[in-house]
Structures are given as structure tokens and as C-alpha cells.
Amino acid sequence: MKPGLLSKKSKMGARRAPIRLNMRHPLNRAIVLAVVVLFLLSLMLRRETPSFYNMLFGSRSSSSSSNSHSTEFQQGKKTTDINNLANEVDDDPLSLSPFMNVELEPISTHKMDCSIDADHLSELRKRHDLSYTVQYLKRYVRFTRTPGLQRSLMTKLNQTMITDRFKTVQIGRTYQKEECPPPLELPVPKSGFPATVNASDFLFGVSTTYERFMNPETTPIGEWIYWLTDSHGHTNGAHLVLMLLDATDHELQEVANLLGDVGINVDVYHSDSSTEMAVRYVTLVPTLHAHREATNKKWLVTCDDDTFFPSMHGLIDKLKTFNTELPMYIGTLSEDAGAVDRHGSQAFGGAGVFLTLPMADLITTNFEKCTNEEGINKANSGWGAQGDILLRNCIYDNSETRLTNLWDLWQLDFLGDPSGFYEWGIKPLSLHHYRGRGWHLSRPVQMSKIAHTCGEDCTMMRFQTKDDFIVSGYSVARYPMGIDFDYLQVEATLWAPAPNRGWNLDYMLGPQRPPLHRTGRKIAWELVESDVNPDGSVIQTYLRYKTDERWVTADQKPMSIVDGIIELIWIPDQS
């Protein structure tokens, strides 16, 4: 194919035209500089994606030349030193990390300070629409990475969260300096960091639209930085194939630039909306199989643009237990028994579908037969042809392979308040459906920030204090009447989509204990921001609103009449 021309649409519904980014073009260099600045913000991210949307996407018209059609990105050196953008660094993934020593253990220069930072609280109030009067608590957590310690569903501490009381703070006023009580001492497993992940066995495939990618409410770029890079501007070895529906050549290049400049190895291709949606989904497999990197990989993975992998070390370790010489099909079922009843037993794609090369070869060989009119009709569960069903049928009709269920992958097909799931204390290997828009809303990137210094096992790890607080990484919850329930069970704050028979989620979550909403037995502050600081500390900010109807007593009286802020500052034990 000649440079500058798109190939014809293939039978698989994709047109491919990989091209290299021309770094001599001045507009490309401008994009690099802008995204370098963004990258630093994303590393020290203090809020959700919309806050840095203007920095990242404010110059669409100044992206690279429009005669480039798609992307093959070769990661080059970037001037991303966190102390001085002008300083070039080498390719050592840890060379940019201020959080580790040469033994790959966390370090911190942070000095404990429990004074009220008036400017900081003022910014929080503006960002999150808080009242001027708040209840405020700052508490330090000193973690000790302990070799051989196993991750527990609950770690109990012999200390209290509150040493005196919550402070009532008038935002805008200045306060005297305050000494800190001794920090909460938390033993944690010695687990891997995002910066040390080697994901070179993985080739991921995702299909989305340019609009979803560029929309600040749905863009996955912050999430992909976490599980496709070391979070310091280098790839972690994984490769991404991104298919954009009905995108222009200019849009393909723009997206490729943005992803390549933050360290993601990526190829971006056209996808055609005239092709049946289920067929477009299955097309990811032969597209991955034909990729130049496929023979160097062990796993070809399809997932959604709202799939998040919070523990790449854990995922890699789990998949090492399988024989990649066999044609394997690995995933998980929906948590909703109704969805399994409607669509059948197969890997539900939002949790991630993991295929070995022999399996991808089988699917590619049978692609035409699997995606003909008969195949499409067989994949119609009454809700239109389903890509997950089409993929399953292709495998089941042409082999003896059946789904291997990896229960630590989560599709998260539920509605309502997700706190019951996220406060459970488990270590999920994937998360899905967390952007709201009909499903639930959570902040997996913010919850996972603690992994950069504490290790991946610290993400969503629960601990309980003597005064009946439970910290889960999703929330800080207080139980003023005591913890007199089975915390190993999920709190029934969530439910299955209709038709919900009341037990739809039980086979995956277990029977759930009654919710504590509106009982006066629970009040919770939920994580809204997390920041990895240059001094090696991590701050987590949890908020509670006085208008939250969940936190009232049994006679409907509010448990607090002012908004609340809890900030946890995590520091490593360096003794």
C-alpha cells in the first residue's frame, strides 16, 4: 500500500493503514510538549479526568498533519523529569520515580503536619461544591510492607481513627499549627508496583468511538496510563490495538499522538459502522491475530473502553498458571443471573476476554463462517446479535474448548449504590461499568493511586480501627452503633437490572446482608481525589454531603448537619 492511502475495507469490517508519526512536524512537537505537561498532571492527579481536559484536548486543530492515517508509535525519549522538563532521562522505567529506592522499596521525605491548610480546603470546596462549614479530619497511615504477609479481607488495628474529635472548620479562616497524633500503623503485603509491571505477553484490543475517547466524561486515557504504562511515561510492554468507529484520518492520528506521547504502545485503525456491531466486536480477534506483534505475545485480550485492570501483577501471575500452548478461552460470567439466562454462558466482554494464540488462530480461520448471516442470527438473544455470543459460538462450534472462568474478573452488571461491592475488601483483577450513564459510578484510578507507593495489594484493601471505622479505599465508613454484622458478606446496596428477582447476584456475590442506609448505623465519606505527592506520600480525600439521604437515622433525622472531609495521608515505614 502506498503511503497516504487507506486500504480497502476488508471482509472483517476494518480498514487498516498503519503509519508512523512524523516528529519533524512542528505541530507534532507541540502536541508532545502539551501531553508531557498533561502526563505530569496525570501522575500527580488530584481530581478526575474533566479537570485536565483542557490541558489534554484543548488544541484539537493543532494536532499532527492530516495526511497521516493511523499509527505505529515507537516510544522515544521524552523530557518528562518531574523536577525539570528540560532534563532528558534514560529509559529505565524507575528513573523518574521519586517514590522508590534502588531496592524497589518506597521512600518518602514527607514531614507529618496536621495543620489545616486553608488554601487547600478552599480549592476542595470549589471543586466539589461543599459548604463553607465542614467537619474535618486529617489522619496519617504509616504502612509497613511485610514479606510473606497474605492479603486479608479485613485487617484489624489496635488504634482509633479519631484521637480527639472531628474539627468544625470554617473554610476561608486560618488556623494555628497542630501536632499530629501517632499514625495508624498498617501492615501490608509486599506486592508489586505499577512501575515494575512487565506486560510484554499481552496484546489488547479495544473498539470505541472518537467521540467517547475525546469526551472528558468517558475518555479512558487516564485509566490506560495506569495499566498500559509504568505511569512514568514508559510502556510496560503491553501493546494496544484501538479501533475507532467512523473516525477520519486526522482523528486517528490525533488519538495516536495522545496515546503514544504518554507511553502507550498503540496502533489505531478504522472501524466501519456499516458492519454489524457483533461482527465488529469479533473482528478484534483476527485483527489482533494479524498484528505484527502477535507472535511475540502469549495473550490476545479483548475488552471495553471502560475496562480497568487494577492489579496487573496479580493478573499476570494468575494467567501464568494456564498453558498458553492450548487453545484457551478465559473470562467470566455476568454477576447477574438474569443476563446469563438471557444471553447464555460465555465470557462477558467488559470484564476482559483472554485468548491464547492457538485459540485466536482458530477464530481467525473460521471467521467468515462464524460471522455469516446464519451465525449472526444465532447470536441474537432477543436483544439483537451479541458479540459475546458470536465469539462463544465461533469457539464452541469449531472446537472442544469451553470457557475457563476466572472469577476475579468482574463484569459488574449491577445498578444502584456500588459501595457494597467496593467496600467488600476483595482484590479484583478487572472492573467494568464504572462511569455511570445507567450503570454505577466509581473512581478506579483514584482508588489505585495508593499502589504506586504501597503496592497493588493496597488497592481496595480494608482495615478496621478500634472505634469502628472501616477504610476500604472506596470509602471511610463509621459504624456508630458498632460493627455487629458479618463484614465478609456484601452489603446489599446494589441490585441487578430488571427483571430483578432479588437473588440475581447471589451466585457471584453470595447472599447479601441488609443495607444500613437510613438506619443511623452507618455514615460514610467516599473517595473523590487521590494524589501521589513528589515527597512520596499519598493523600486520599473522602467527602460526605450533609444532604446525602443515606446517612439519616431510622426516624429520618440527618446524622450530620454539615458536609464532611476526611483526608488520609499514607507514608511508608522507613525504619
Image (cartoon, rainbow, N blue to C red):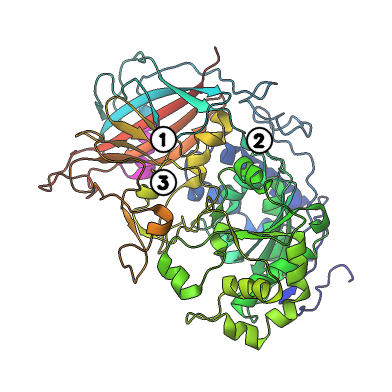
Circle 1: element type:
loop
Mark with earlier residue (2, 3): 2
Name the secondary structure under disc 3: helix
Residue 302 seen in this snapshot: no
**Whether label 1 touches label 3, CB < 8 Å:** no
Nearer to us of marks 2 and 3 is: 3
Whether label 2 touches label 1, CB < 8 Å = no
Residue 270 in the image: above or below residue 430: below
Q: Is residue 165 visible?
A: yes
- The chief SS type of the magenta part is helix
- Residue topped by disc 1: 462
**Considering the image in quadrants, where does the C terminus appear?**
top right
Contact (Cβ within 8 Å) of mark 2 with mark 3: no
Q: Of all residues shown, which one is farthest toward the front?
A: 400
Which residue extends farthest right?
A: 2
State the residue position of label 3.
422
Q: Amino acid at mark 2?
A: Ala
Q: Residue at x 67, y 41 (%)?
A: 36
Residue drawn at x 82%, y 61% is 19
Residue stretch in magenta: 120-131
Q: Amino acid at mark 3?
A: Tyr
**Mark 2 highlights which residue?**
195
Q: Is residue 399 magenta?
A: no
Q: Earlier in the sequence, mark 1 or mark 3?
A: 3
Residue drawn at x 60%, y 42% is: 314
Residue lying furthest bottom in this view? Answer: 373
Residue 128 in magenta stretch = yes
Q: Residues within 10 Å of mark 2 (few under 14, many from 20)?
A: many
